[in-house]
C-alpha cells in the first residue's frame, strides 16, 4: 500500500539474478523499535558458493518430496489396468500379488515402448464410475491394454508405417530402417498383427461405449437441486 | 550429485540427453519416467520393482556403454511403484557415483518427485513456441522444489534457434543441441555420441552442458585434495 513493489519482491522475500561478472545492489528499509534498533534481523547471509548444488540434508529432501507428492498422483488410473486376474482389494495390490507379474515379457517391443500385458489383480473402478457391470470391465483381446490412448495410437501408427515402408524404397533403405528400429522383419510382422487385433478390439469397445454415451441421459433439472 | 533432466513436454529428447549426459559425467542414467519409460531395458529387475519393494537398487543396475537403471513398461508396474521411495533409492545408488534422472513430462508428482530428489536440473526445450511455455512451467516447478537450473538444452535445433530468447526467458545458460541422426541411436545401447564423436556438433554441445553441471559442484567436492 506504500509505493510499487520492486519486481522480485513477493511480500516476504526478494529474489534476483545477478549476471556473471556483475554486481547487484539491494536496498531495504526496516522498522525500528523504541530502542532505535531493528525489531527483527532484516537480512542474513544464508549460503555462499556455486549455485544449485548445495547438499541438502535428508529432512529437507523429505519435505521437498512431500511437497512434490501434493502435485497429484501421476500413476495410470486403476481402471486402465485390465483385470486379468480375480479382483484383489487395495491392501493386497502391493503384496505378493505383484511379484512375478511386471508385464515385461515383450522384450522385442521394449524400445517401441509398447505397453504390454499388465496382470495384477486390481480392484474395479474406485469411484471413477458407478458402473461395475461385466461389460464395463471386459478386458481387451489378449489382455493387451493400451496406455493413454493417443500415445498408443501414435506408436501403433509408427509401427504400421514402418511395416508399410518395407515394400517401398531400395533394399539399402529398408535394411537401414530395420537396423535403426530394433525390429526384425518377423517381430515387426508380429507386432503389427498384435496392433490389428488390439485396434479392432478397441474400436469395438469404443463403439459400444459411444452408443451408451449417446443413450445416457442425466436428468439435469431434477438433480440440480441435489448438488 | 543427482541431476534431473526435465522438460514439460514429451518428445523433446530428455531420454537421449539423459544417456548422453550420464556418459559425459560418468554417471548412472536412471529412467525415472515411471509411466513411459524409454531407456533400454533388457532383462531383470527394474525401477518399478525397486520402488515396489521387490528388488534392491543394485540388482536393477545394468552396465553397458552407459550404466543404466532402467524402468519397466507395464501399467501395473507403474501403478504399484511408489515414487516416494525414489529418494532412498537414489541415496543408495549415489553413495559412490553420480546419477542423471530422466524425468517424465508433465507437472504432477511423477515429475515433481525426481526434481525434489535431484540437486540440480537441466531443462530440455524444443525451439518451437509451445515448448518454451512448457519449459517455463517446468522451470517454475523446479524452483518450487528447490532444484537449481544449471542450463537449458535447446534440442533438435536448427540454425536459427532462439538461443538468446530462451536464455533470457529461463534465466540460465542455453546450449543449442543440433539435430543429428547419431543422437537418435543413443537409446539403442550403442556408444553415446559424446564418446564416439566428441568433436562433432552434438558431441560438443553435450560437453558444454556437462561442463555447466561440473561448474556447479559444491565447493567441498571440487576443492577436495
Image: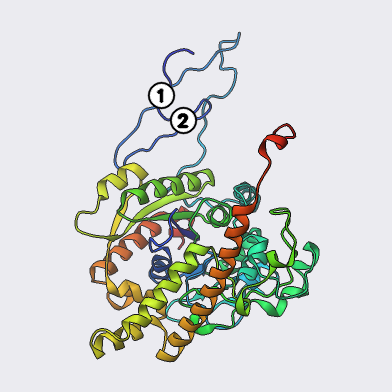
What number of labels is visible?
2
Instruction: Say if A28 sits above or below A149 in the image.
Output: above
**x and y percentages locating residue B84 in the rendered image:** 65, 58
Name the residue at the front extreme.
Answer: A215
Left or right placement of residue B199 versus residue B183 in this view = left
Instruction: Say if B46 sits above or below B156 in the image.
Output: below
Q: In the rendered structure, find residue A122 and report the number of the disc placed on it.
A: none
**Residue shown at 42% from the left, 70% from the top:** B19
Q: Quadrant of the C terminus of chain B?
A: bottom left
Which sits in the foreground, B161 or A199? Answer: A199
Element marked by disc 1? loop
Residue designated by label 1: A6
Q: Earlier in the sequence, mark 1 or mark 2?
A: 1
**x and y percentages locating residue A208 in the rendered image:** 60, 64
Which sits in the foreground, A164 or B153? Answer: A164
**Residue shown at 64% from the left, 59% from the top:** A77
Chain that bears disc 2? A
Instruction: Say if B163 sits above or below B3 in the image.
Output: above
**x and y percentages locating residue B115 in the rendered image:** 53, 54
State yes or no: discs 1 and 2 in contact (Cβ < 8 Å).
yes
Name the residue at the left extreme.
Answer: B159
Which sits in the foreground, B78 or A141? Answer: A141
The quarter of the displayed image where residue B184 is located: bottom left
Left or right placement of residue B68 versus residue B181 in this view = right
Residue designated by label 2: A14
Badge 1 and badge 2 both on one subunit: yes
**Residue shown at 32% from the left, 50% from the top:** B173
Residue B69 seen in the figure: no
Which sits in the foreground, B112 or A151? Answer: A151
**x and y percentages locating residue A170 in the rendered image:** 23, 87
**Neighbourhood count class around disc 2 (C-alpha, 10 Å): few under 14, some 14–19, many 20 upward:** few
Amino acid at each position: 500500500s506504500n509505493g510499487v513493489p520492486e519486481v522480485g519482491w513477493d511480500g516476504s522475500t526478494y529474489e534476483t539474478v545477478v549476471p556473471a561478472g556483475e554486481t547487484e545492489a539491494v536496498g531495504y528499509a526496516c522498522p525500528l523499535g523504541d530502542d532505535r534498533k531493528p525489531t527483527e534481523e532484516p537480512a542474513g547471509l544464508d549460503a555462499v558458493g556455486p549455485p544449485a548444488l548445495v547438499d541438502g540434508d535428508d529432512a529437507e529432501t523429505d519435505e521437498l518430496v512431500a511437497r512434490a507428492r501434493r502435485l497429484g498422483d501421476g500413476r495410470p488410473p486403476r481402471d486402465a489396468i485390465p483385470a486379468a486376474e480375480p479382483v484383489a482389494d487395495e491392501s493386497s495390490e502391493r503384496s505378493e500379488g505383484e511379484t512375478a507379474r511386471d508385464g515385461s515379457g515383450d522384450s522385442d517391443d521394449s524400445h517401441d515402448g509398447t505397453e504390454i500385458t499388465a496382470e495384477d489383480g486390481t480392484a474395479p473402478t474406485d469411484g471413477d464410475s458407478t458402473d461395475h457391470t461385466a461389460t464395463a470391465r471386459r478386458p481387451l483381446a489378449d489382455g493387451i491394454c493400451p496406455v493413454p490412448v493417443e500415445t498408443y495410437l501414435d506408436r501403433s501408427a509408427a509401427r504400421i508405417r514402418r511395416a508399410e515402408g518395407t515394400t517401398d524404397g531400395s533394399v539399402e533403405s529398408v535394411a537401414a530402417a530395420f537396423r535403426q528400429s530394433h525390429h526384425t522383419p518377423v517381430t515387426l510382422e508380429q507386432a503389427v498383427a498384435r496392433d490389428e487385433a488390439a485396434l479392432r478390439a478397441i474400436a469395438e469397445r469404443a463403439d459400444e461405449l459411444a452408443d451408451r454415451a449417446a443413450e445416457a441421459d442425466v436428468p439435469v433439472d431434477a438433480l440440480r437441486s441435489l448438488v | 550429485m543427482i541431476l534431473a533432466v526435465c522438460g514439460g513436454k514429451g518428445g523433446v529428447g530428455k531420454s537421449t540427453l539423459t544417456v548422453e549426459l550420464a556418459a559425459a559425467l560418468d554417471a548412472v542414467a536412471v529412467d525415472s519416467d515411471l509411466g513411459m519409460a524409454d531407456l533400454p531395458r533388457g532383462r531383470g529387475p527394474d525401477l518399478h520393482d525397486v520402488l515396489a519393494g521387490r528388488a534392491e537398487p543394485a540388482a536393477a543396475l545394468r552396465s553397458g556403454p552407459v550404466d543404466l537403471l532402467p524402468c519397466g513398461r507395464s501399467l501395473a508396474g507403474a501403478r504399484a511403484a511408489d515414487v516416494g521411495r525414489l529418494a532412498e533409492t537414489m541415496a543408495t545408488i549415489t553413495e559412490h557415483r553420480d546419477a542423471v534422472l530422466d524425468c517424465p513430462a508433465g507437472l504432477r508428482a511423477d515429475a515433481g518427485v525426481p526434481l525434489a530428489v535431484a540437486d540440480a536440473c537441466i531443462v530440455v526445450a524444443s525451439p518451437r513456441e509451445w515448448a518454451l511455455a512448457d519449459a517455463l512451467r517446468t522451470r517454475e516447478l523446479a524452483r518450487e522444489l528447490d532444484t537449481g537450473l544449471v542450463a537449458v538444452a535447446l534440442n533438435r535445433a536448427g540454425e536459427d534457434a532462439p538461443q538468446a530468447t530462451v536464455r533470457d526467458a529461463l534465466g540460465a545458460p542455453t546450449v543449442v543441441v543440433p539435430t543429428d541422426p547419431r543422437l537418435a541411436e543413443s537409446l539403442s545401447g550403442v556408444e553415446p555420441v559424446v564418446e564416439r564423436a566428441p568433436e562433432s556438433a552434438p558431441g560438443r554441445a553435450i560437453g558444454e552442458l556437462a561442463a555447466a553441471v561440473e561448474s556447479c559442484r559444491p565447493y567441498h567436492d571440487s576443492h577436495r585434495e
